[in-house]
Amino acid sequence: MPNISKVGLAMPSSPIRKLMPFANAAKKAGKRVIHLNIGQPDIDSPVEALRALKEDARTVVEYSPSDGYDSYRTKLSAYYMKDGIPVEKEDVIITTGGSEALVFGLMSCMDPGDEIIIPEPFYANYLGFTQMAGVKIVPVTAVIDDGFALPPISDFEKVISPKTKAILICNPGNPTGKVYSPETLKELTEMVLKHDLYLFSDEVYREFCYDGTEAKSVLNFDGIEQNAIMIDSVSKRFSMCGARVGTIVTKNAEVRATVMKYAMTRLSPPTLGQIASEAALLAPESYFEEVRSRYVERRDVLVKGLNEIPGVLCPKPGGAFYAVCRLPIDSSDKFCQWILEEFDLDGDTVMMAPASGFYSTPGAGDDEVRIAYVLDLPLLEKAIACIKAALEVYPGRTN
C-alpha cells in the first residue's frame, strides 16, 4: 500500500471541526447540541444577494475571468474607497474564499522554509495554510490577562531572522475579537518597513467593531504600499460563508502578477458566488447597523454570563464575533470532548473549539476555549448554563 505524503501527514486537524463525530453521536443519543464552535452566523444574507441569484437569467454557469468579474472588482474598489481605503480595481484579485487568497499570497511571497511571524492565538487554519506553502510559523504570544493585546514590537524583533519574510495579523482578530488601534498598527508598519517584510492583514471582520472602536486597514498607512497584502472575504461580512468568494488586495504589481499565475491555474473563482457578492455590495448601511447591534447584545450576555462562573475569565472582545475564555480545566481538548460525550443539562450540551488549536506553541491554550457568539440569546443563555453546570462536575477541574 503506497504511503501518504509527508505534507499530508503533517497537515493539522481543524480544532473547529475535529469534534464533529462526538457532536453527531450526541445528537444521535437525543441531545441538542448548541454549536458555538464555528463562525457560521445565523444572520440572514442580504436580500440583494439572494435576489440576484434568483433573478439571474443565464443558461450556462460559465467560467469567470481568473481574477474575477470586472464589474465586481470595480464595485469592490468603490466599496473600499467609500471606507477611505485607497484601492483601485487593478489592485484586486477575486479568490475562492479568503482561504485561497491567503494561500496564494503565501505561495507568491515566500519560499518553502521561510518564516512568517504571527501573533498567537491565531485563526487555526493558518496552521494548514502555512503547511501547504511549506512556511514555518514563528509565534509571538498574546495573553488573555491583558485582553490579547498585540505583543510589544520588541517581541517581534526578537524573533526576526534571515529566514523571516512576512508578518500576518488578523484585525479584528479571530479567535480573540481583539481590535488593534491605529497607533499599534502604525508601529507595526514601521517595523515591517524597517526590516523590509511583507505584511499580510486578514481583514474579513473589519465591519464588526464595537464600542466606538475602528479597525484601520493596513492599506490606510503611507509607505507600506509595496509590502502590504490585504485578505478579505464576503463570508462573515455578508453572512455568505457558502459563497466561497474572497479577495486578495495589494498595490504590489509583482505580487499580483504572481498571484495571477495561481489564479489562472485554478481557472476561476465561483461564478454564482460572485453574482451574489457583487449584489451584496448594494446592502444599505442599516444592514450592518442591525447586525452589529445583535452581536453587541450577544457579546455582552456571553461575557457577563461566563465571567460570573467561578474560575472563568473572558475578556470583552472589541470586534468580530468570537471570544476566548479561560476555564478551570486540565485540558480544553478533553473538556470539549467530555461535554459532548458525557454531559447534558436537560438534554442540552455545547460544542466549543479547544483554543489549543489556535496556538503553535506546545501547551499554550490548554485551559482556553473559543466561543463563537453567532446564535441568538436564548441559545447563548442555555449554553452558559450548560458550561457552568458542566464545570461543577467535570472530573478534570483544576480549582
Image: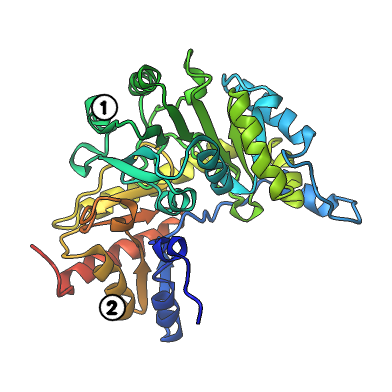
User: How crowded is the residue under tag 2: few (<14 C-alpha within 10 Å), some, or many (20+)?
Assistant: many
User: How crowded is the residue under tag 1: few (<14 C-alpha within 10 Å), some, or many (20+)?
Assistant: some
Can residue 31 be seen? no
Comparing marks 1 and 2, which lies closer to the viewer?
A: 1
Give left or right: position of 347 versus 267.
left
Q: Residue at x 36, y 29 (%)?
A: 180
Q: What amino acid is at disc 1?
A: Glu
Query: Could you say which is closer to the camera, residue 11 or residue 313?
Result: 11
From the image, tell me which residue sits under label 1.
Answer: 157
Give left or right: position of 188 versus 335.
right
Q: Position of residue 290 (x, y in %)?
A: 54, 40
Q: Residue at x 74, y 28 (%)?
A: 74
Vertical comparison of 69 with 11: above or below: above
From the image, tell me which residue sits under label 2.
Answer: 343
Can residue 49 be seen? yes
Q: Position of residue 279 (x, y in %)?
A: 74, 40
Image quadrant assignment for residue 86:
top right
Q: What amino acid is at disc 2?
A: Phe
Query: Could you say which is closer to the camera, residue 373 or residue 143?
Result: 143
Q: Quadrant of the C terminus?
A: bottom left
Q: Position of residue 33 (x, y in %)?
A: 41, 72
Q: Secondary structure at mark 2?
A: loop
